[in-house]
Amino acid sequence: MSRTLAIIKPDAVAAGNAGNILALLEERGFRVAAARMTRLSREQAGAFYAVHRERPFYAELVEFMTSGAVIPLALEADDAVPRLREVIGATDPAEAEEGTVRKLYAESKGRNAIHASDSADNAAAEVSFFFSDSELVANSAA
């Protein structure tokens, strides 16, 4: 078992799709080790997405991620990082496979319903960004 981070983004929370997304993740074999609903400050969103600071979409991304409530999730599964990337689908919902989170719930490439860690190293850093060790409920030997 390994762990990864997902964030149900403001567009999906506002549209009332958070429960549907969480149910789909659990149906696909992920177990929730930690979850919370929060609203990111500009400083938090800026720090979380700092790797993208020089990219043209950074300011828009920070603005979007602070526009409403988000739900960070620490998820566990075998090969959690690549499996979650497969389950959420392509960044652009028009290119996402049928049945993926983004095909089902994303509005556009920029408002794409969910974030997922892209590597094991980033997953560890991103989980610790949102959750302390004491907040993580071990569902298995992670």
Image (cartoon, rainbow, N blue to C red):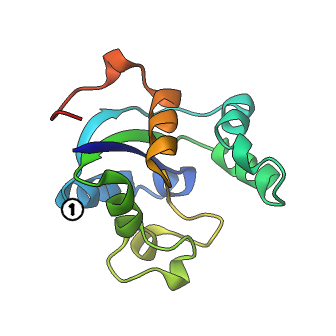
Q: Position of residue 94 (x, y in %)?
A: 54, 84
The answer to which quarter of the image holds residue 102 is bottom left
Look at 50% across and 55% down and name the residue there.
118
Against 64, is 138 above or below?
above
In x, y percent, where is residue 91? 55, 70
Q: Residues within 10 Å of mark 1 (few under 14, many from 20)?
A: few
When asked about the image quadrant of residue 82, the answer is bottom left
> In this image, 16 relative to 10: left or right?
left
Circle 1 residue: 28
Quarter of the image holding residue 49? Answer: top right
> Who's the residue at 18% across and 60% down the image?
27
Residue 25 placement, left or right of 94:
left
Element assignment for label 1: loop
User: From the viewer's perspective, is residue 60 above or below residue 87?
Assistant: above
Q: Name the foreground residue: 125 vs 103.
A: 125
Query: Percent position (x, y) of residue 120?
Result: 43, 46
Quadrant where the N terminus sits is top left
Dividing the image into 4 quarters, which one contains the C terminus?
A: top left
Which of 138 and 22 lies nearest the eye of the viewer? 138
Of residues 23 and 139, the one drawn nearer to the viewer in this rendering = 139
